[in-house]
Image: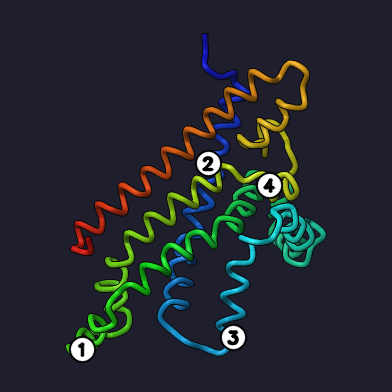
Amino acid sequence: MDLLSPMEWTALLLSLRVAGWAIACSLPLAVLTAWALGRYSFPGKTLVDGLVHLPLVLPPVVVGYILLVTMGTKGVIGGWLFQTFGVRLIFTAEGASLAVAVTSFPLMVRAIRLSVEAIDGGLEAAARTLGAGPVDRFFTILLPLMAPGILSGAIVAFAAAMGEFGAVITFVSNIPGQTQTLPLAIYAATQQPDGDAVAARLAVISFSVALVALMASEIGARRLRRLIGQG
């Protein structure tokens, strides 16, 4: 007997795709944001830092509502995208990726920023005296030393994206085969009289994915630190 039904497999694979695209697309911005916040002082830095981390403290439903009013087909940005390019994010898997990217973004920034702040500034100063420009210093010194934080942040954010519920259901609804990710499928199963077994199976899978991701984050970051001589 198959472990999961076709619809349950669809929810799992959709969750993996949504989380994967969310992290892949937002990771470069997270690296640059963490680098700027960890290395430079500038006017409004406290405000920027607060805005970046706001999704951590806002209820996910509020995040979803903000996306709904800004990125929906009648929103300021979403309306322009729809009318100009025919791009619609609401009620789509792409919209789900956007929702989980917003909620998981601060997790990546925090992990990467810790790596940035742990880097000895003398390394950059020495490279500067040897004639290395800002771009060279970033790619040859900072980026390799940031790698453990990048890996850890990306994997933890991926696990969090797999489990996001409130922002997704508020922004893209719960449409089987289109926007119904793993957490939404669990919720739908609990609303059915005979859905306890389905909910239990999906909950075990969700638990397992999260645990494996956290273990992979720790092991991968530890090995990278040893590789670059940080631990």
The residue at the point 69 percent across, 52 percent down is: 89
Work out whether mark 3 precedes mark 2 in sequence or the reverse, and give the earlier one: 2
The three-letter amino acid code for the residue at tag 2 is Arg
Q: Nearer the viewer, mark 3 or mark 2?
A: 3
Pair 1/4: label in front: 4
Pointer 2: what residue? 17
- Tell me the residue that label 3 is attached to: 44
Point out residue 121 in the picture as x, y percentages from the top left corner.
29, 82
Number of numbered tags placed on the structure image: 4
Residue type at mark 4: give it.
Val
Residue 131: give its label.
1
What amino acid type should be assigned to the residue bearing mark 3? Gly
Element carrying mark 2: helix
Characterize the local packing of mark 4: few (<14), some (14-19) or many (20 or more) Cα atoms within 10 angstroms. Answer: many
Q: Are the residues tagged 4 and 3 within 8 Å (C-beta)?
A: no
From this view, report whether residue 8 is shown above or below residue 134: above
Circle 4 or circle 3, nearest the eye: 3
Q: Are marks 2 and 1 in contact (CB under 8 Å)?
A: no
Q: Secondary structure at mark 1?
A: loop
Of circles 3 and 1, the one toward us is: 3
